[in-house]
Image (spheres, rainbow, N blue to C red):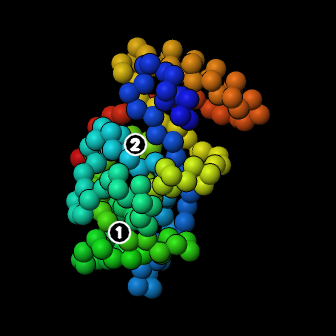
């Protein structure tokens, strides 16, 4: 992942993620949610592109990542399901077996972008503990500088992945954001 980010000149952003489905619980209410575990400090540009806004609280910052704070940012729809009219920010929820503090609630994307359809965002791990970051990634989202760079970037990525992970199966897809219906 870091090699991709460092060696491809056409990239503007690269975001690695693991995603899953898990149960989040608050005050006896449980819901199955789509979870994105990522290096959250790299997500902000994609959130900006999708025109996702923080409706309450805040998004992760560098200190959260540096110190490994057990924080979570949730969607407005999940906040309504779990908290009703109560403010979700500063409440503790259980995600699987982990207790996390809600620090922010985000809006529905105003631009349809595939990687941004999650209910929950959690930081992958603090950068000081790279050994905990090992394991498979489900996806790496790349943004290129201009549309004409898509095909050449895909070829570079394919070559890097084949060289560095010859035993792994992978798929490279292109998607283009479009405004959502109001």
* x and y, in percent, of residue 120 in the image: 42, 60
Marks 1 and 2: in contact by CB < 8 Å? no
| Residue closest to the eye, 58 or 68 | 68
The residue lying at 51 percent from left, 55 percent from top is: 125
Quarter holding the N terminus is top right
- Residue 179 found in image quarter: top left
In the displayed orientation, state which residue is furthest to the right: 167
| Residue closest to the eye, 116 or 122 | 122
* x and y, in percent, of residue 170 in the image: 66, 34
* x and y, in percent, of residue 83 in the image: 32, 77
The residue lying at 24 percent from left, 51 percent from top is: 53
Circle 2: element type? helix
First in residue order: circle 2 vs circle 1: 2
40, above or below 179, in the image: below
* Residue 29 in the figure: left or right of residue 112: right
- Residue 75 found in image quarter: bottom left
- Residue 143 found in image quarter: top left
180, above or below 75, in the image: above
Which label number is shown at residue 42?
A: 2
* x and y, in percent, of residue 44 in the image: 33, 44
In the displayed orientation, state which residue is furthest to the front: 128
Q: How many marks?
A: 2
* Neighbours of disc 1 within 10 Å: few (<14), some (14-19), many (20+): many
Q: Which residue is mark 1?
A: 102
Circle 1: element type? strand
Q: Does residue 75 appear in the picture of this structure?
A: yes
38, above or below 178, in the image: below
The residue lying at 57 percent from left, 17 percent from top is: 155
How far apart, in angstroms, are the residues tagged by discs 2 and 1? 19 Å
125, above or below 150, in the image: below
Which label number is shown at residue 50?
A: none
């Amino acid at each position: 992942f870091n090699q991709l980010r460092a060696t491809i000149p056409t990239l503007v952003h690269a975001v690695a993620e693991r995603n899953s489905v898990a149960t989040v619980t608050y005050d006896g209410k449980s819901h199955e949610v789509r979870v994105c575990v990522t290096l959250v400090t790299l997500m902000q540009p994609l959130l900006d592109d999708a025109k996702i806004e923080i409706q309450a609280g805040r998004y992760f910052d560098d200190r959260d990542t540096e110190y490994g704070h057990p924080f979570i940012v949730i969607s407005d729809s999940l906040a309504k399901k779990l908290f009703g009219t109560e403010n979700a920010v500063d409440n503790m929820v259980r995600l699987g077996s982990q207790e996390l503090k809600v620090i922010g609630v985000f809006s529905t994307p105003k631009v349809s972008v595939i990687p941004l359809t999650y209910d929950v965002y959690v930081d992958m791990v603090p950068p000081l503990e790279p050994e905990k970051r090992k394991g498979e990634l489900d996806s790496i989202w790349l943004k290129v500088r201009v549309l004409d760079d898509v095909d050449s970037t895909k070829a570079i990525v394919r070559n890097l992945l084949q060289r560095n992970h010859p035993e792994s199966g992978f798929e490279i897809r292109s998607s283009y954001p479009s405004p959502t219906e109001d």
